[in-house]
Image (spheres, rainbow, N blue to C red):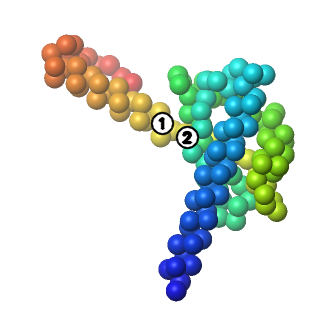
Amino acid sequence: MKSLLDKSVSRKREQKTSLFLREISSIIQSLVPDEPALLKVFITKVELAKNYSTCYVYFSTYTDKSDFGEALEILKLYRPSLRKALGQAISGRYVPDLRFVYDEDKEKERKIMNLLDKVAERESGQAPIDETEED
């Protein structure tokens, strides 16, 4: 019986997380006309604290981490209005505190993909890999 309850709780958590991701993405997209710097970042995932008091919103960039720093300052300014809009979009007793985090995993993924591309180029004979090059 307990495993059925655990599955139900897990499913509800996943649904709520998905809903938060969708709504936060939509709200941030509505800010883009006023804040073009937000075009340089995108949400990769959302995690809710176990007690639902905090929502961690993970971002990555299309270029490098410096773009996230610029967007982070804007997001911090809009945090109260983001929470208010989120509260209006999602029915619930409490709207969690929003925390914006840079997603290091996407950066690592980008570096790995670059290395794999270089290996593929080397294997196909297009270009040698520079052994001294650091990423």
As drawn, is 99 to the left or to the right of 105?
A: right
Q: From the viewer's perspective, is 47 left or right of 120?
A: right
Q: Nearer the viewer, residue 53 or 66?
A: 53
Quarter of the figure with residue 16? bottom right
Residue 72 x, y percent position in the rendering? 70, 32
Q: Nearer the viewer, mark 2 or mark 1?
A: 2
Left/right placement of residue 43 relative to residue 131 reads right
Taking depth in this image into account, of 68 and 8 the one nearest to the observer is 8
The residue wearing badge 1 is: 106
**Three-letter amino acid code at the position of disc 1:** Lys
Q: How far apart are the two marked residues, 2 and 1, measured between alpha carbons?
A: 8 Å
Position above or below: 27 against 71: below
83, above or below 115, in the image: below
Q: Residue at x 61, y 58 (%)?
A: 15
Residue at horizontal 70 percent and vertical 65 percent from the top: 51
Q: Secondary structure at mark 2?
A: strand
Residue 34: mark: none
Residue neighbourhood size for the residue with mark 2, other residues' Cα within 10 Å, grouped as few (<14), some (14–19), many (≥20): some
In the picture, the quarter occupied by the C terminus is top left
Residue 44's label in the rendered image is 2
Please tell me which of labels 2 and 1 falls first in the chain: 2
Vertical side of 24 occupied by 15: above or below: below
Q: Is residue 131 visible?
A: no
Asked if the residue under mark 1 is in contact with the one under mark 2, i.e. CB atoms within 8 Å, the reply is yes
Q: Check disc 2 and give the amino acid type.
A: Thr
Q: Position of residue 49 (x, y in %)?
A: 66, 59
Q: Is residue 37 above or below residue 21?
A: above
Dividing the picture into quarters, in which one does residue 43 lie?
top right
Closest to the observer, 64 or 52: 52
